[in-house]
Amino acid sequence: MPDLLAHYAISYLIASRVVKPKYALVIAIAGILPDIDALLRVHRWITHSLVLVIIVLLVLVLFSKLTTINRHTYHVILLSILLYALHIVLDIFTGSTPILWPLTMSSYVITMNICGTVGEAMIDVKPEVTIISTPNNFTQQQVLQGPIVTDMGVIIAIGVTVTIFLEQLENLKLRFKHH
């Protein structure tokens, strides 16, 4: 599964495209919030439902129409909801996730592979996509164990860090070039 570091790094990268990097550090926390259910020892609980995310989004849109919410605040809230939903979408590819709860009592996982074969006279590429449905399991566990940081999370975090660093370096070059 994407670990907390991977979820946070991806969320930070996206948030930093929309708001200043120092604000992105805080807003990116929304990208790890679905895993708050782990504190209750029920991982991939209703906090991983895209249906609930859509309901919250609709309530937000309705609320924004009825009030004079600051446009910037509205965008930050929308960004936070997007990062929250992205976490759920990423989890679908790594383990059973109740994305359609309460519409269905099933959790889903998608596995994808693109296999290739290269021979003397041929090249063959074959995609494989499988959607697996299992019953939701919202049972509280005695102990809940899972990755906080994995090698993939470290690789993603390094990639995000290098990307941000190179962008900042390019911004400095442009600033000095104009002065």
Image (cartoon, rainbow, N blue to C red):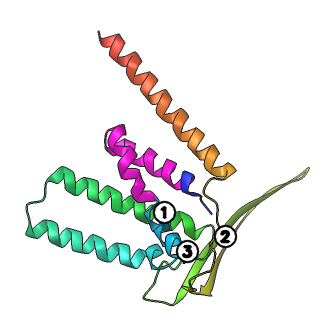
Mark 3, mark 2: which one is toward the viewer? Answer: 3
User: Mark 2 — residue?
Assistant: 111
Residue 92, quarter of picture: bottom right
User: Mark 3 — residue?
Assistant: 43
User: Mark 1 — residue?
Assistant: 87
Q: Earlier in the sequence, mark 3 or mark 2?
A: 3
Q: Residue at x 64, y 60 (%)?
A: 147
Bounds of the magenta span? 6-31
Q: Work out which quarter of the rendered image holds the C terminus and state it.
A: top left
Label 1, label 3: how many angstroms apart (C-alpha)?
13 Å
Mark 1, mark 2: which one is toward the viewer? Answer: 1
Q: Is residue 179 left or right of residue 160?
A: left
Asked if residue 93 is positioned above or below residue 72 in the image, the reply reads below
The one of 111 and 88 positioned closer to us in this rendering:
88
Residue type beneath disc 2: Thr
Asked if residue 177 is positioned above or below residue 95 in the image, the reply reads above
Instruction: Give the percent coordinates (x, y) of residue 73.
Output: 20, 53
Residue type beneath disc 3: His
Q: Earlier in the sequence, mark 1 or mark 2?
A: 1
Q: Is residue 77 left or right of residue 11?
A: left
Instruction: Give the percent coordinates (x, y) of residue 81.
Output: 35, 63
